[in-house]
């Protein structure tokens, strides 16, 4: 029996069309970017390999700020990169995009899952770009530290899982479409937004077909890179770390390690806040988009106040 109830969230009638939607040359490669809304700029980074979807978060944030979304290298309409992307290269691409688009900086950068680490790297490598950060259940920089049996959960074993995904997922020989949907519903909160579920499902299915799946292959290197950069400190900027309270896909020890890492991330800034999200899973745009929007609104307000 599935744990979640599928129910549309109330999002209002405001659905702004992009006032910018184009390929942007960042230096030999092009990224497809879109912008909506007006006001301080919020950049929404997708999860690993472009998996997942921001859903109604985009239109809700566009009600009080400008919102930049883009397809990362090898995803959607964007050109592929020559190498598997690690979090420092992901940050470099985002920085190059902001430079080429000549947008007003600094921005509020929102990272989700693996892009939570790239957002931290971005703040370290290009501090002038970032006014504030929101990290949505970020991948722990300490993901590979615990090698005990209890600490080896789905996240640590993701290298093996990814290879199975790359071989089978897109062709229905492993989980298939219905299997992924059941997984999402089993490990999300009690209410799931049905208007976003299908788009989320499609984004996950597209991962093994995309060259950007290299981000997942480079997961371990990304964690090592992020851990090294963070050891030198993080700029003292407003930071909110949203941590999933529903971790049913993980072993208890893995969940414990993730929460510890999230608290450590938040403590790296004197303006940092660790915020557990009740009824929120790693797929938070499905079950707690309101928590994401609220955190972004707070950071935008701080930028406006300054």
Image (cartoon, grey):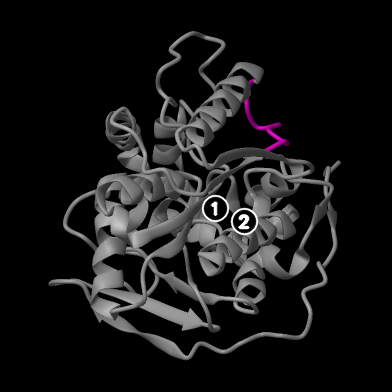
Q: Residue furthest left?
A: 28
For residue 177, the mark is 2
Identify the image quadrant of the N terminus: top right
Can residue 127 be seen from the camera position used here?
yes
User: In the shown orientation, is residue 86 left or right of residue 201?
Assistant: left
From where the camera sits, is residue 53 visible?
no
Q: Which residues are magenta?
A: 244-251
Snapshot quadrant of residue 75: bottom left
- Residue 251 sits above or below residue 242 on the image: above
Identify the mark at residue 77; answer none if there is no mark: none
SS at mark 1? loop
- Tell whether 142 sits left or right of 112: left
The main secondary structure of the magenta stretch is: loop
Dot 2 falls on a residue whose secondary structure is helix
Residue annotated with mark 1: 172
In the depicted view, which residue is nearer to us: 246 or 174?
Answer: 246
In the picture, measured across the screen, residue 305 lies left or right of residue 268, that is right
Q: Is residue 211 above or below residue 241?
A: below
Q: Residues within 10 Å of mark 1 (few under 14, many from 20)?
A: some
Res 300 → quadrant: bottom right
Q: Which residue: 56% across, 89% down?
A: 17
Residue 175 in the figure: left or right of residue 264? right
Q: Estimate the spatial distance between the alpha carbons at disc 1 and disc 2, rounded to whole Å.
A: 7 Å
Q: Residue at x 73, y 45 (%)?
A: 280
Image quadrant assignment for residue 96: bottom left
x, y percentage for residue 185? 75, 48
Residue at point 64%, 55% (across, down)? 295
Residue 209 locus on image (x, y percent): 39, 59
26 within the magenta span? no
Marks 1 and 2 in Cβ contact (< 8 Å): yes
Work out whether residue 2 or residue 19 is closer to the camera in this orientation and state it: 19
Where residue 246 appears, as percent x and y from the top left, is 72, 36
């Amino acid at each position: 029996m599935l744990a979640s109830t599928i129910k549309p969230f109330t999002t209002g009638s405001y659905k702004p069309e992009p006032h910018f939607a184009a390929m942007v040359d960042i230096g030999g490669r092009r990224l497809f970017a879109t912008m909506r809304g007006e006001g301080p700029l919020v950049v929404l980074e997708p999860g690993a390999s472009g998996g997942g979807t921001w859903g109604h978060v985009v239109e809700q944030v566009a009600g009080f700020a400008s919102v930049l979304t883009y397809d990362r290298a090898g995803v959607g309409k964007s050109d592929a990169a020559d190498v598997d992307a690690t979090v420092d290269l992901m940050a470099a691409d985002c920085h190059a995009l902001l430079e080429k688009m000549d947008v007003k900086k600094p921005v509020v950068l929102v990272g989700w899952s693996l892009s939570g680490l790239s957002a931290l790297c971005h703040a370290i490598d290009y501090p002038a770009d970032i006014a504030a950060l929101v990290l949505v259940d970020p991948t722990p920089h300490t993901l590979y530290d615990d090698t005990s049996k209890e600490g080896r959960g789905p996240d640590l074993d993701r290298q093996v899982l990814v290879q199975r995904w790359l071989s089978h997922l897109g062709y229905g020989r492993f989980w298939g479409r219905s299997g992924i949907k059941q997984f999402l519903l089993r490990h999300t909160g009690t209410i799931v937004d049905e208007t976003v579920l299908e788009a989320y499902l499609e984004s996950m299915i597209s991962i093994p077909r995309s060259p950007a799946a290299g981000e997942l292959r480079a997961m371990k290197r990304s964690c090592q890179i992020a851990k090294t950069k963070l050891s030198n400190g993080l700029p003292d900027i407003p930071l909110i770390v949203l941590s999933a309270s529903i971790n049913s896909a993980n072993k208890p020890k893995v969940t414990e390690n993730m929460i510890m890492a999230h608290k450590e991330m938040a403590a790296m800034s004197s303006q940092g806040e660790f915020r557990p999200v009740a009824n929120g899973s790693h797929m938070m745009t499905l079950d707690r988009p309101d928590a994401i929007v609220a955190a972004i609104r707070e950071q935008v307000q701080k930028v406006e106040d300054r």
